[in-house]
Amino acid sequence: MKNIAKGVLIVSTIFLLTACGAIRDEVTENVDTNVSTGVTTSGFEKTIKVDGRKGDWRSIPKIVSATNQSVTKIKVAHDDNYIYVAVYGVGMDPGYQLFINSDNNPSTGFDFWGWSEDGADYMIENGSLFRSLNSGWSWEYLGPQDVTAVVKTKFVELRIAKSALTNL
């Protein structure tokens, strides 16, 4: 099985925290060990049809969960060409940001206000891809062509082309 970069798993957690208003302390307590160790487990390698239906995700284990938040869990899968992200919740805002630390280096990319495992090299905002230009809020617009998204108030499903991300 091919491994997903640790940064992808960690950044999915940051999606939960920044875009959807989850409380940091609660999420930190509920992070699965896969997020903190970067170890992928069986079930993560799978092609997902991005159609807004949750059925494709049944066999994929969650990488993070929270209670009493707008986002309740996140799942990540991949195949040879894409990374897939599913965000489950209740009453989620249709606007979102997903941050990706593609090089697994917290000292490069956007700095998340003091988080130790940050350094986002990419951001997906409402279906468009951006590349970080430095540690501040400075982004290069790359466009929507490498991202497919279905956004609902209780489920967000994304597909990101691996070819658009360097240093995975």
Image (cartoon, grey):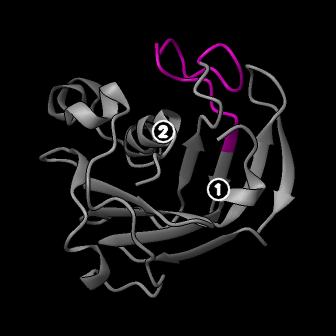
Q: Which residue is drawn at 45% across and 76% down?
A: 47
User: Could you tell me residue 20's position as x and y percent?
Assistant: 39, 49
Q: Is residue 65 left or right of residue 146?
A: left
The verdict on residue 10 being magenta is: no
Question: Which quadrant does the C terminus fall into?
Answer: top right
Judged left or right of residue 13, residue 145 is right
Q: Is the magenta stretch mostly helix, strand or loop?
A: loop
Residue placed under numbered mark 1 in the picture: 125
Q: Which element is circle 2 on?
A: helix
User: Where 164 falls versus 25 (above or below)?
Assistant: below
Depth check: 139 or 3 in front?
A: 3
Q: What's the amino acid at mark 1?
A: Glu
The label number, if any, that marks residue 11 in the structure image: 2
**Real-space Cα distance between discs 2 and 1?**
13 Å
In the drawing, what numbered circle is on residue 2?
none
Residue drawn at point x = 71 percent, y = 37 percent = 167
Give how far across and how far down residue 128 sits, in percent: 72, 62
Q: Nearer the viewer, residue 149 or 50?
A: 50
- Give whichever of 26, 44 is nearer the camera: 44
Q: Residue furthest front?
A: 1
For the magenta stretch, what is the residue range?
106-122
Residue closer to the observer: 82 or 106: 82
* Residue 82 lies in quadrant: bottom right
Quadrant position of residue 55: bottom left
Q: Residue at x 46, y 13 (%)?
A: 116
Q: Considering only order in the chain, which callout, 1 or 2, is on the residue closer to the N terminus?
A: 2
**Tag in front: 2 or 1:** 2
Counting from the top left corner in percent of width and height, residue 18 is at: 46, 39
Badge 2 crowding class, 10 Å Cα cut-off, few under 14, some 14 to 19, many 20 or more, is many
Q: What residue type is labelled 2?
A: Val
| Residue 70 shows in the view | no
Q: Relative to 4, does residue 82 appear above or below in the rendering?
A: below
